[in-house]
Amino acid sequence: MTQDRRKRVRYDVNYPAVMLTSHGVLKGETRNLSQHGAYIHCQHLLAVDEKILLIIELPLDEPLELPAHVVWTKTTDADDAGLPQGLGVRFTW
């Protein structure tokens, strides 16, 4: 069994997400969320360290707009806890 290295609690969610990047707008789905970051399932990956504005559409509230940067990416070929292709972001507030 592998040990989870995360220090913060993450919540499994399925919220639509929009990422505003220097290359344009990308859509995805927030799959897990913590106070300091999120995992976004998306078809187009961004470069590590790329800065974005992440907009998470919440079901019963106004969208969250969070400045963030990409800390890691995962392709469909990678085997990482069964997560689909996407990227991990850290909020930079």
Image (spheres, rainbow, N blue to C red):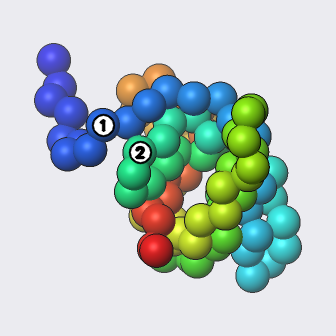
Farthest-out residue, top = 1
Return the x and y of residue 17 as percentages of the image width and height: 73, 48
Establish if 50 lies above or below 9. below
Pointer 1 residue: 9
Q: Is residue 63 above or below residue 19?
A: above
Residue 66, label in figure: none
Asked whether the viewer can see residue 79, the reply is no
Residue at 73% of width from left, 74% of height from top? 21
Quarter of image, res 45: bottom right
Q: Nearer the viewer, residue 22 or 90?
A: 90
* Residue that carries the numbered disc 2 in the rendered image: 34
> Looking at the picture, how far across and down is residue 59, in whole percent?
74, 32
Q: Dots 1 and 2: beta carbons under 8 Å?
A: yes
Amino acid type assigned to the residue bearing label 2 in the image: Ser
SS at mark 1 in the image: loop
Point 50% across, 36% down: residue: 32
Q: Answer with the quarter of the image where residue 6 lies.
A: top left
Classify mark 2: helix, strand or loop. Answer: loop
The spot of residue 42 in percent (x, y) is 70, 45
Looking at the figure, which quarter contains the N terminus? Answer: top left
